[in-house]
Amino acid sequence: MKKVHYFVVIFIMISISGYCQSKQQKEVTAAVELLKRGIVDADKGLLGSITADQLVYGHSNGKVQNKSEFISEILDTKTMDYSSIDLSDQTIQISGNAAVVHCIYSAETISKGAPGHLKIGVMLIWQKQHGAWKLLARQAYKV
């Protein structure tokens, strides 16, 4: 009888754990969508609220920016203006208050007046800070 009781308790704990991870994955997915919207809309307030103060933002060309440099570059539409961003093959792994998102990032852009297309692989590191998911690090790579 004790074995059955332990089995039931373990099953319930695994079920609850799965639910929590599912909920956290949904929260991270929503945070990724906010990041995309902030980039496309060049929304300084949104980008400021969704990124951690300690942000390390790595580009596929090796350039690395901090939070203020990243936001400034997004707001400077002379550098690159994003018309749309689509993510595919997205995976999310949660570990405590950290999440790793991996995806293929495709964007329609306008750079120096000319339309362009960007397709790169991206790894995003998110951290839950004061109850909200914040982008802590990003590294892009060529595909």
Image (cartoon, grey):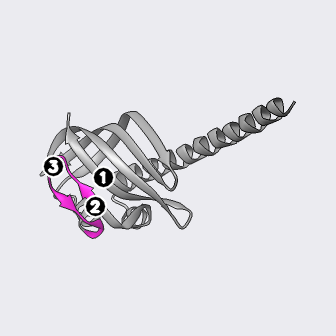
User: Would residue 111 be found to the left or right of residue 120 on screen?
Assistant: left
The amino acid beneath tag 2 is Val
Give yes or no for contact between labels 2 and 3 (Cβ–Cβ under 8 Å): no
User: Would residue 36 be found to the left or right of residue 29 on screen?
Assistant: left
Q: Which residue is mark 1?
A: 138
Measure the C-alpha gap from mark 2 to mark 1: 6 Å
Q: Quadrant of the C terminus?
A: top left
Q: Which residue is mark 3?
A: 111
Q: Assess whether residue 64 is covered by the magenta stretch.
A: yes
Give yes or no for contact between labels 2 and 1 (Cβ–Cβ under 8 Å): yes
- Residue 56, numbered label: 2
Residue at image coords 58%, 43%: 21
Range shown magenta: 57-68
User: Would residue 12 be found to the left or right of residue 69 on screen?
Assistant: right
Label 1 sits on a secondary structure element that is strand
Label 3 sits on a secondary structure element that is strand
Q: Assess whether residue 20 is covered by the magenta stretch.
A: no
In terms of image quadrants, where is residue 106? top left
Return the disc, 1 or 3, that comes first in the chain's sequence. Answer: 3
